[in-house]
């Protein structure tokens, strides 16, 4: 079976570096849902060298910090599951107390309807957030 994260970016490409890329996922109801995807096909975080792991986690941190600075979410969720797609990627998701699933995980059943106006307000802030992400990620040294 072909790996979808090897075959395509996996969402709206925000930035691509030598080792990894950052995409905005197209997850309905969650406008601040990003993924840090390792470019090479590896299944587990421990498949990376120590330097690669450090670079990967620093990139995840940059995404989290940008979400916090630009969107002021209630919480940022970070997860690396890979059960459905065994290609190393981290979910970095800005969560808001008003989102349809909060405080439950994004994969749980919705607790209320999606608040379109609030989601649209977040979407309006994404261009500035993503511009900042591109600058910060490009400045990260390869360790």
Image (tube, helix red, strand yellow):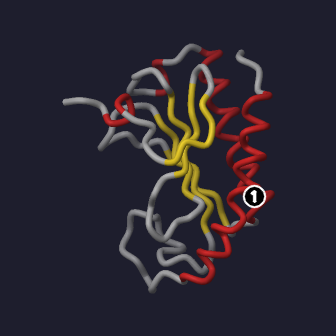
103 and 14: which one is in front? 14
37 and 47: which one is in front? 37
Which quadrant would residue 141 be assigned to in this image?
top right
The crowding category of the residue bearing disc 1, from other C-alpha atoms within 10 Å (few below 14, some 14 to 19, many at least 20), is some
Name the residue at 41% across, 22% down: 42
User: Farthest left residue?
Assistant: 1
Name the quarter where the C terminus is drawn. Answer: top right
Residue 31: x, y in percent?
A: 56, 64
Lateral position of residue 108 relative to residue 139, left or right: left
Which quadrant would residue 59 be assigned to in this image?
top right
Name the residue at 71% across, 17% down: 142
Number of labels in the image equals 1
Name the residue at 60% across, 31% down: 16
Which quadrant would residue 8 be assigned to in this image?
top left
Residue 138: x, y in percent?
A: 74, 29
Name the quarter where the N terminus is drawn. Answer: top left
Give above or below for 94 relative to 79. Answer: below
The residue carrying mark 1 is 68
Give above or below for 72 relative to 10. Answer: below
Per the image, label 1 sits on a secondary structure element best described as helix
140 and 96: which one is in front? 140
Give above or below for 8 relative to 130. Answer: above
Name the residue at 68% across, 59% down: 126
Give above or below for 41 relative to 121. Answer: above
Lateral position of residue 54 relative to residue 5, left or right: right
Residue 118: x, y in percent?
A: 63, 80
Lateral position of residue 128 relative to residue 117, left or right: right
Residue 72: x, y in percent?
A: 76, 66
């Amino acid at each position: 079976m072909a790996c979808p994260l090897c075959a395509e970016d996996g969402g709206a490409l925000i930035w691509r570096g030598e080792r990894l890329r950052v995409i905005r996922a197209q997850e309905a109801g969650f406008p601040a849902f990003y993924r840090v995807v390792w470019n090479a096909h590896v299944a587990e975080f421990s498949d990376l060298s120590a330097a690669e792991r450090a670079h990967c986690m620093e990139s995840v941190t940059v995404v989290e910090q940008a979400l916090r600075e630009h969107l002021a979410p209630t919480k940022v969720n970070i997860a690396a599951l890979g059960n459905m797609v065994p290609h190393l990627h981290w979910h970095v998701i800005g969560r808001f107390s008003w989102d349809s699933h909060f405080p439950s995980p994004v994969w749980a059943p919705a607790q209320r309807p999606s608040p379109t106006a609030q989601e649209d307000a977040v979407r309006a802030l994404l261009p500035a957030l993503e511009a900042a992400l591109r600058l910060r990620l490009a400045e990260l040294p390869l360790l």
